[in-house]
Amino acid sequence: MLQDNDDTAERDKLLYSFNHANQDQALVFGIDTSTEEGRAQFKAEYYALCELAPELVKKENLIFPHEMSPAISTEPHFRRVWQHYREHMFRLRFAALAESGEISAADAELSGRFLDLSGQPSFNVYVMGRLNLLEHLHSDEGYQATMRVMDTMGLGAIEFDMLTAMPTEEQFWEQFDGVFELSEAEMRAELPNIVTDPSNLAKVDALIEGHSAEAVDGSAGETRQLA
């Protein structure tokens, strides 16, 4: 936050600071890190960058390229299916914990209504509560139940950055991907469980593969009702 909202220099310093930019740090250097020698060479190069640009590259963020998760496509049609996959996996985990009793029946009902898990789930209000932007939620039973459910699911520690252009709900889902270790391979395996109509499944497969424009256009309406 700015100490002086009228100070143009302070505002510009915050706006253009590398600390608050969305940076892609998938550094590879063209080095094979699957060998001990390669890892040593990569670490030396990485630490040199840490010294040169400490705002951008931090030692604690070191990940060897061979250990990085495969990049998830940002192609819009693929991302639509990916979002359905995210919501599907949330429901599965939620249902499993409710069935085992780790989530109480009362919390399952209250949080299910709060997040609208029977329809198109929305986490916007939950996120706003977490950010203390809706103080009345602190006395709302649905919100309190949702907080307990999130803790049980391992999602209570998710943090939100107000100094980035990424919407807060998308920040939630991006971190959800990491907590649940979502992958494209698992998404493809789960498609028959997400898309209940076999005729739509072929269209969604084509949409993911980026096949014909006709397949994409034909499935545009159906992918909104995958679950």
Image (tube, grey):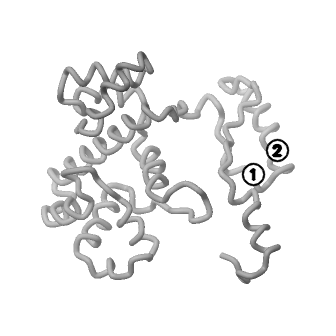
User: In the depicted view, which residue is nearer to us: 126 or 214?
Assistant: 214
User: In the depicted view, which residue is nearer to us: 127 or 218?
Assistant: 218
Q: Would you say 183 lies left or right of 144 here?
A: right
Q: Would you say 39 lies left or right of 120 here?
A: right
Q: Which residue is mark 2?
A: 49
Q: Would you say 155 lies left or right of 55 here?
A: left
User: In the depicted view, which residue is nearer to us: 220 or 150?
Assistant: 220
Instruction: Kindly report which numbered mark, 2 or 1, lies closer to the viewer in this rendering.
Output: 1
- Disc 2 is placed on an element classified as helix
- Residue 94 lies, with reference to residue 10, above or below; the image says above
Q: CA distance from mark 2 to mark 1?
A: 9 Å
Residue beneath the point at 52% across and 35% down: 74
Amino acid type indicated by mark 2: Leu
Q: Quadrant of the C terminus?
A: top left
Q: Which residue is outermost to the top?
A: 212
Residue beneath the point at 67% across and 51% down: 60
Q: Quadrant of the N terminus?
A: bottom right
- Residue 110 lies, with reference to residue 170, above or below; the image says below
CB under 8 Å between callouts 2 and 1? yes
Residue 127 x/y as whole percent = 41, 65
- Residue 104 lies, with reference to residue 50, above or below; the image says below
Residue beneath the point at 75% across and 25% down: 30
Residue 128 x/y as whole percent = 41, 69
Amino acid type indicated by mark 1: Leu
Residue 56 tag number: 1
Residue 102 x/y as whole percent = 21, 58
The answer to which quarter of the image holds residue 28 is top right
Residue beneath the point at 43% across and 40% down: 181
**Sequence order check, earlier mark of 2 and 1:** 2
User: In the depicted view, which residue is nearer to us: 152 or 82?
Assistant: 82
- Disc 1 is placed on an element classified as loop
Residue 86 x/y as whole percent = 35, 42
